[in-house]
Image (tube, rainbow, N blue to C red):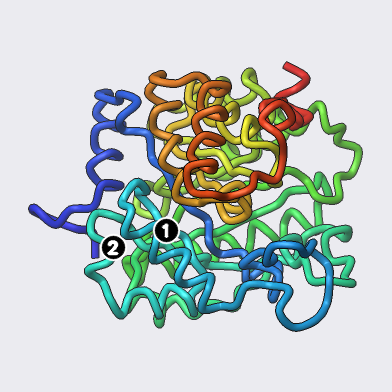
């Protein structure tokens, strides 16, 4: 289902240039991760104004239809390369394929237990267990790119189960002609692995895992947490055939969003997949609009925050934070560098 001719998607064209050694910042791949319904349930589309996450009751959260409309608005904007959704929402969007234009529809291919974030639950604490709701044969009807996530915790039994599940998925996807990208989370319940060592631990697991995987089953690109510039540079330099992407993590300030983009690209990342950093912004369209200028060094992260607040003012939107507060770096990893 990969695109051809004049209808080829921007993702495919950019990957070609990256693999050919012709990368420029214009080839950086931007994705909106709108698959949070597989993690947060009702809370996924974010709250309405005046409410906070965790509350219960009608009128507090945006609806599924609101969530789909947010996706459609960003598709119309055309600044993204990938729209990542759940299978159910991807199926709905794919019914009007013209909206995608040059954007690739991707679907979350599994939902391991460490992404389950329901109110009142504690699924994030135990070691991750693999699970897959999605039927790839059905997804193939409307998308040929899926996300598969794994989490290693330095526990032999649970890590083996994770690897066995990934192997089964990988073989099935390849047989169906479905591409995948691999998300490797930091340990969620580590056994004798310190947070300072997460970058090295994850990097080694990625290279070791893929060493036994032939080309037809290898991931199209990677999605990892930002564990600092050194860890990211190490992974990006270790194998030039791997295209490394970063995940957005928690919401944070607007400065966190732009700073993460800037530092990650400089360290060798070629993809960014941001979920909450886009979905929970005051203006999703305007925060996405400013990502390219930051990546292309037309704006510094600080300047982009100012431009963002200026755009909110023009729209009559009250920002969540003052410009001063929103210009601060609050992400612990970014702050430590």
Numbered disc 1: secondary structure = strand
Classify residue 214 as left or right of residue 279: left
Give the labeled residue for mark 1. 83
Q: Is residue 258 visible?
A: yes
Task: Work out whether 99 lies above or below 6.
Answer: below
Quarter of the image with the C terminus is top right
Rendered location of residue 175, percent (x, y) = 36, 69
Pointers 2 and 1 in contact (C-beta within 8 Å)? yes
Residue displayed at 45% across by 62% down: 146
Q: Gap in Å between the C-alphas at discs 2 and 1?
A: 9 Å
What x and y, as percent, mark residue 153?
80, 47
> Which residue matches tag 2?
100
The answer to which image quadrant residue 141 occupies is: bottom left
Vertical side of 31 occupied by 245: above or below: above
Q: Position of residue 21 (x, y in %)?
A: 27, 24
Q: Vertically, is 14 above or below 280? A: above
* Front residue of 32 and 47: 47
Give the class, few, some or many, for how many residues have Cα within 10 Å of label 1's Cα (few <14, many ≥20). many
Whether residue 113 sits left or right of residue 145 in the image: it is right
- Give x and y (percent) for residue 269: 48, 30
Q: Residue at x 49, y 66 (%)?
A: 85
* Quarter of the rendering containing residue 74: bottom left
Q: Earlier in the sequence, mark 2 or mark 1?
A: 1
Q: Is residue 167 left or right of residue 153?
A: left
């Amino acid at each position: 289902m990969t695109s051809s001719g004049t209808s080829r998607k921007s993702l495919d064209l950019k990957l070609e240039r990256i693999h050919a050694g012709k990368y420029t910042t214009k080839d950086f791949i931007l994705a909106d991760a709108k698959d949070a319904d597989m993690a947060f349930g009702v809370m996924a589309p974010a709250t309405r104004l005046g409410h906070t996450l965790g509350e219960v009751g009608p009128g507090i959260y945006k609806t599924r239809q609101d969530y789909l409309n947010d996706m459609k608005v960003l598709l119309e904007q055309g600044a993204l390369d990938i729209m990542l959704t759940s299978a159910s929402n991807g199926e709905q969007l794919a019914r009007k394929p013209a909206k995608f234009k040059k954007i690739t529809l991707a679907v979350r291919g599994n939902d391991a237990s460490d992404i389950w974030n329901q109110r009142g639950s504690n699924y994030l604490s135990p070691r991750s267990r693999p699970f897959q709701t999605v039927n790839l044969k059905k997804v193939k009807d409307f998308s040929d790119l899926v996300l598969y996530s794994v989490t290693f915790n330095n526990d032999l039994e649970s890590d083996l189960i994770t690897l066995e599940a990934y192997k089964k998925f990988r073989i099935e996807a390849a047989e169906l002609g479905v591409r995948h990208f691999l998300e490797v989370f930091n340990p969620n319940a580590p056994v004798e692995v310190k947070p300072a060592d997460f970058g090295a631990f994850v990097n080694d697991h990625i290279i070791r895992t893929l060493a036994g995987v032939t080309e037809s089953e290898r991931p199209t690109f990677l999605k990892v947490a930002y564990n600092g510039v050194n860890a990211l540079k190490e992974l990006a330099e270790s194998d030039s055939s791997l295209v490394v992407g970063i995940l957005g993590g928690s919401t944070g300030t607007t400065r966190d969003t732009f700073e993460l983009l800037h530092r990650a690209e400089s360290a060798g990342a070629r993809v960014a997949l941001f979920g909450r950093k886009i979905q929970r912004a005051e203006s999703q369209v305007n925060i996405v609009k400013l990502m390219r200028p930051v990546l292309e060094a037309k704006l510094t992260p600080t300047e982009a925050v100012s431009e963002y607040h200026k755009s909110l003012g023009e729209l009559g939107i009250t920002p969540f934070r003052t410009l001063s507060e929103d210009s601060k770096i609050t992400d612990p990893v970014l702050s430590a560098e």
